[in-house]
Amino acid sequence: MGASVANDGPGGKVPVGVLGARGKVGTEVCKAVEAADDLELVAQVDQDDEIDALVTSGARVVVDFTHPDVVMDNLEFCIDHGIHAVVGTTGFDEGRLETLRGWLGCSPGTGVLIAPNFSIGAILMMRFAAVAAPFYESVEVVELHHPTKADAPSGTARRTAELIAAARREAGSAPIPDATSTGLDGARGADVEGIRVHGLRIRGMVAHQEVILGGVGETLTIRHDSMDRASFTPGVLTGVRGIADHPGLTVGLEHFLDLD
Amino acid sequence: MGASVANDGPGGKVPVGVLGARGKVGTEVCKAVEAADDLELVAQVDQDDEIDALVTSGARVVVDFTHPDVVMDNLEFCIDHGIHAVVGTTGFDEGRLETLRGWLGCSPGTGVLIAPNFSIGAILMMRFAAVAAPFYESVEVVELHHPTKADAPSGTARRTAELIAAARREAGSAPIPDATSTGLDGARGADVEGIRVHGLRIRGMVAHQEVILGGVGETLTIRHDSMDRASFTPGVLTGVRGIADHPGLTVGLEHFLDLD
Amino acid sequence: MGASVANDGPGGKVPVGVLGARGKVGTEVCKAVEAADDLELVAQVDQDDEIDALVTSGARVVVDFTHPDVVMDNLEFCIDHGIHAVVGTTGFDEGRLETLRGWLGCSPGTGVLIAPNFSIGAILMMRFAAVAAPFYESVEVVELHHPTKADAPSGTARRTAELIAAARREAGSAPIPDATSTGLDGARGADVEGIRVHGLRIRGMVAHQEVILGGVGETLTIRHDSMDRASFTPGVLTGVRGIADHPGLTVGLEHFLDLD
Amino acid sequence: MGASVANDGPGGKVPVGVLGARGKVGTEVCKAVEAADDLELVAQVDQDDEIDALVTSGARVVVDFTHPDVVMDNLEFCIDHGIHAVVGTTGFDEGRLETLRGWLGCSPGTGVLIAPNFSIGAILMMRFAAVAAPFYESVEVVELHHPTKADAPSGTARRTAELIAAARREAGSAPIPDATSTGLDGARGADVEGIRVHGLRIRGMVAHQEVILGGVGETLTIRHDSMDRASFTPGVLTGVRGIADHPGLTVGLEHFLDLD
């Protein structure tokens, strides 16, 4: 899957800039760009640096892991200068997306990807779960994380359950069978739109999730194990490599993956 | 997913006939048809019975789990009478498929589904594995069966590996990394077109398979557990319900599943 | 592990009688005894049969899967005649056990095994979980059953959690870490003496349980999958083979297993 | 499990020295000792430091992760000065162990623990596998590691298979059933003393192993996932805390764990 960004830099490599380059995530992104044969890291910009470095360095694509307070200014600058942007910063509501669409309307060849989740494995798990759900009578979600996590269930587990519930509604699936009539509070997990979700907190775990589907005589299990924070970097690079082929605004990395 | 076969019988149920009705598989099919709210079992035909019963009973769809020696005669009869057929009998080569296409050309509204595998879980596992494979550096297949199985690896595991290999070739994936330089014969499993496949034989197991994919810091696992022979019946019913919408010849149940 | 019952029948096989021989469980026990090289099925007794058949047939060991209403009469008869008994019938309270001890005091060479659970896998899982628990900061229990089960969590899961809690108390383990401060009701499962227990109900599942333990950088998982009701028969045969070496009353099959 | 070393330092903490303190492993050990409430890190010694620091600092226990070339000198020094030693350095053969026994004979209160594996999870997995193996007809081992590993199967997997084979021999277990008559080379894994062992190499994996045991209608799975190199430190601390109660030479951390 070679780079398809048109205006390559010297040596055929795509010149990439990183905003938030000294943050925890930005540091990993810089390392991953440097390690990629088809990309070249030409600018590392953080809080006290001049954003003009993106232009003077000739960056064709910018990766932004900064802060909700500054990301809109960053993106306005990028779009103004025709630089594509791959954005992992949070805090985008419909208003902000509308503003971005307006700016992009004036720069039709430029692409901006806003992605709440860059883990390709998590995206595939959610997609496969939603595709499979209508074929099965039963489906539940189990997520396992380190015990310092504050929320239960995890955001990814809730999102997975919502996508499963939507797929089942659309297919007209019957309610999930459950004869439980006696037991202990909480034994059957949390209810997210009719889908049971269970959260485990175990020292030694990082971020793991399992979707279990079952029908007569068989079960299908889709499991994602994330064992290292660096696991999001292949998703970021997929965004960097695909952004020139997706002008305009895209929300969600799944639109860059060939899943059909 | 209600029945979409047009010419329904009394009460709106699709009238279904079973060929090979007293065989091990046919018996399960009969039970499943009888248990389905939208289907009606109107004919059970086996070796010494008159096949005309299919016509006199008004069957709109026939399920055939018989024998390679008789299945072509059965299908000629069905197509002649405009009865759709869902076929799990083995032994179809390109010559037989060509003959079927010829017969169906004269009966354009009739559908025939030839499926080597009616397990929806196995079909989904293979599909998801092939879709996911290009996104990961590594992928291996592990299958687990009862210890009386004669072949290793299983046919499904070989087929899964072939589909993964094809998907990786098409995507131009790099070779799978493997630094093994010393060890014991067989430790790294069998090689199926570059994909490592491992077969376990364990008393108590029925038919299980796991596809493990891995990239930087994360893994994705797709597992199918078949714990009962009855697990193929939902696939047969999916074929019965979908056949009227698929006139002509279809090979493989996956074409009846909405997987995109 | 050959039979160690002293007074073998002809051909060195231990003569075995079954009480409740025509019940669902008794039928499986009869089959398993007949299939065992070192045992001989000499008497099959059910509701309307004469219990004297146990004596006239020369049974040395009796397996009882009957009913709480009749089991005490059965056992009095066996003990009176010096026949060992392996009992899966439920309903034993401390009063009944005391009565049995009294009867056995008058027949010192005779053994009676009362076992609530004959699944060797379940016994090993509970044992290993309790042994491992003091070495780990975190431990949770997940059980998965068919959706027609009425109670959640399962009795085995509750019992497992109690044994884990007891082992941790005895070792003076610190409380299990859990920073959950926000979330949905039930997401963290049921609380059984401080151990979190999660119950899944999935069509296609039979009876499955997983104990997950975790410490810094590692986890240990012990999983038991019971895919067939016949899985209790090896435990029954272990009881039959070991009973002559355990005169007096034994509660729990674990005392017949060499686990140290 | 509080410290049981007798001569505690100020504040009731056991004074601990580390040899090889600046190595990759030693660094982790230092961190773990410092983080432990009941231990105090009093000396960090590496290549160019004076080993006398162990004495002047008042260390009661020394942890040695150094090199086969220097470890015997280190241990002679420790034993001479009555300092207990917990040793992860490799290269101990029977001759070296005999020498250590000789030195310890002259210092009867001093303990030395030589451990090839400090992962408590790996030790428990091997132990449980060997205990369970005689109760099951079938057993196989699957290990999963990163693709830069040179040997397959892993040393731990081979050792596990050997322990299982020994336990089965001792119990007089029948050969493991396997009807495989046709297939691909390597599909059934490597043969380690009659036990099948399968090695997977997957990017994203660290060090994982699964032992799968099966009997009629049920399976038991014991899985160890090591996701971080720091996972050996709890085992080292267990050695430090238990060494004063184990004077003389001990080989293997399992003897410090209460597993019965």
Image (spheres, coloured by chain):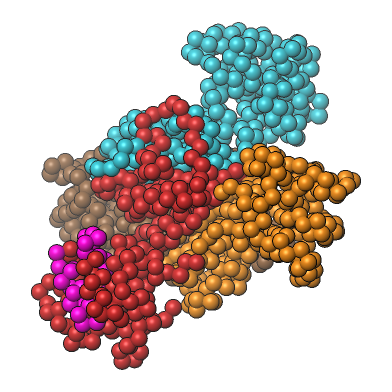
Chain colours: A cyan, B brown, C red, D orange
Magenta span contains residue C96: yes
Tell me, yes or no, if residue A195 can be seen here: yes
Extreme-bottom residue of the structure: C10
Q: Which quadrant of the view contains residue C25?
A: bottom left
Query: Left or right: where does residue C194 sit relative to residue D102?
Result: left
Expressed as whole percent of the image width and height from the top left, the position of residue C77 reads 17, 77
Q: Residue at x 33, y 88 (%)?
A: C8
Q: Which residues are magenta?
A: C69-97
Q: Is residue C214 magenta?
A: no
| Nearer-the-camera pick, A107 or D148 | D148
Q: Nearer the viewer, residue A259 or B9?
A: A259
Where is residue D244? Give x, y as percent.
Answer: 67, 56
Confirm whether residue B258 shows in the render.
no
Q: Residue at x 54, y 32 (%)?
A: A148
Q: Residue D248: give x, y in percent of width and height.
A: 70, 64
Q: Residue at x 62, y 34 (%)?
A: A229
